Amino acid sequence: MLKIRIAIAAALTLCVVMPVAAEAREVKCTHSLAQYTQAISHFEAEAAKARTLAVRNPLYESDLAYLDSVLSDARQCVKTLGPMTTAAAAR
């Protein structure tokens, strides 16, 4: 349970106010690869629930957009940290 809370906190810290343009956004990856991986699996499940709710009620579309944003940032960190972790393990 503690690991899930840490993963959620890690993913939420990614949602600090960032510029709107996707190419202008710089994601700061301050947590471990394992934490981002765990956060992705957690938020994918939450996004699936929000997607189902948004089909029935448009008020949930903002929740879905938020979760998609968090997932996008976490996936970007996994892409960034993945090669670093692999290179460090090879040494």
Image (cartoon, rainbow, N blue to C red):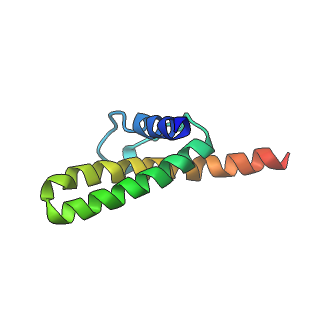
Q: Is residue 67 left or right of residue 71?
A: left
Image coords of residue 37 (percent x, y)? 56, 50
Q: Is residue 35 left or right of residue 53?
A: right
Which quadrant: the C terminus? top right
Give the residue at the far front of this rendering. 1
Identified at 53% across, 35% down, the residue is: 2
Identified at 46% across, 51% down, the residue is: 42
Q: Is residue 61 left or right of residue 19?
A: left
Q: Nearer the viewer, residue 30 or 41?
A: 41
Q: Nearer the viewer, residue 83 or 63?
A: 63
Image coords of residue 40 (percent x, y)? 48, 52
Image coords of residue 55 (percent x, y)? 19, 66
Image coords of residue 68 (percent x, y)? 35, 54
* Quadrant in the rendering for residue 14: top left
Count how many numbered circles sit on residues in the image.
Answer: 0
Answer above or below: position of 91 versus 9. Answer: below
Identified at 49% across, 54% down, the residue is: 41
Identified at 37% across, 38% down, the residue is: 15
Q: Nearer the viewer, residue 17 or 55?
A: 55
